[in-house]
Amino acid sequence: MLLYAGKVILLFVLTIVLIRLMGKSAISQLTPHDLTAIVFVVTLAVTPIVTEQVGRTIAGIMIVAIIHILMSKMTLFRKFNRYILGEPTILIKHGKIIKSNLERSRFSLVELLSNVRAAGYPDIEKIDYALLEPTGEISIIPKKDLAPLTPRHLNLNVEYQGLPLSVVVEGKIQEKNLELIHKDKTWLMERLAELGVEDLEQILYASVNDKDHSLTVDTGKGEKYN
């Protein structure tokens, strides 16, 4: 039983390490070679739990991981990229659906309309382009006269508002984030005391703005201090 448990732990940890080495893309936006590599790795990892070929399985997992890493490197070159990842497919052009591209991509009209509505465009005539990306996501480019206004369009200078950095998460101080704003635990505890919060265990989440060092505390019980 101990040998069996050790085998499961070894293969589980090895699989996690190798998937991490494959990169974040392997677990965020799956491309064909990402998905294939993960399926192969997981299948090979589970196989020796019911057989005795642990050595061959580890070798197989390593080979799959190496192939995946090599293919990921190849996608950096344009001439290989189109064969490994594929290319974006135009599904809507100037407000009109390209039926032939839908059929070629095996992407249903119902799915397309659902994605378009979810992006906030119930009327396809307001869309300049809708593209099916190699990762399977839909990118939507609205017509120019319907694009959201930004301060840049109005020639406005927008002041930097700062970035909230978490300094307490579930009662535990995030010391690395405090270092980023050149503060320490003593400073944090003093600021918390000013807000009337003495016990870290009361805090679900607390953040400090990196610009003005303002502190926001959320207890998770409907109480918020700032």
Image (cartoon, grey):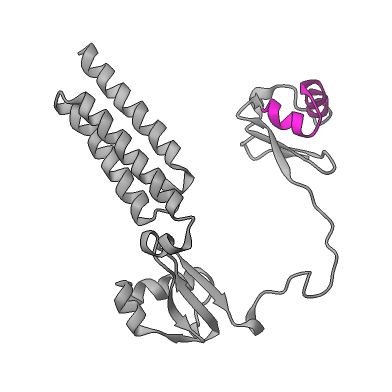
Q: Quadrant of the N terminus?
A: top left
- At 46% from the left edge and 73% from the top edge, which residue is drawn? 131
Residue 162 placement (x, y as % from top left): 78, 48
- At 19% from the left edge and 32% from the top edge, which residue is drawn? 47
Which quadrant holds residue 75?
A: bottom left
Compared with residue 80, is residue 183 higher up or lower down, i.e. above or below?
Answer: above
Give the residue furthest to the left: 51
Residue 119 placement (x, y as % from top left): 52, 69
Could you tell whether 135 is left or right of 48 in the image? Answer: right
Residue 152 placement (x, y as % from top left): 78, 70
Compared with residue 10, is residue 117 higher up or lower down, i.e. above or below?
Answer: below
Q: Nearer the viewer, residue 23 or 201?
A: 23
- At 34% from the left edge and 32% from the top edge, which residue is drawn? 15
Residue 108 within the segment the image draws in magenta: no
Which quadrant holds residue 46?
A: top left
Which quadrant holds residue 217?
A: top right
Could you tell whether 31 is left or right of 48 in the image? Answer: right
Magenta residues, start to end = 174-193
Asked whether the viewer can see residue 135, the reply is: no
Q: Nearer the viewer, residue 84 or 205?
A: 84
Residue 177 within the segment the image draws in magenta: yes
Residue 39 placement (x, y as % from top left): 28, 45
Q: Quadrant of the C terminus?
A: top right
Give the residue furthest to the top: 2
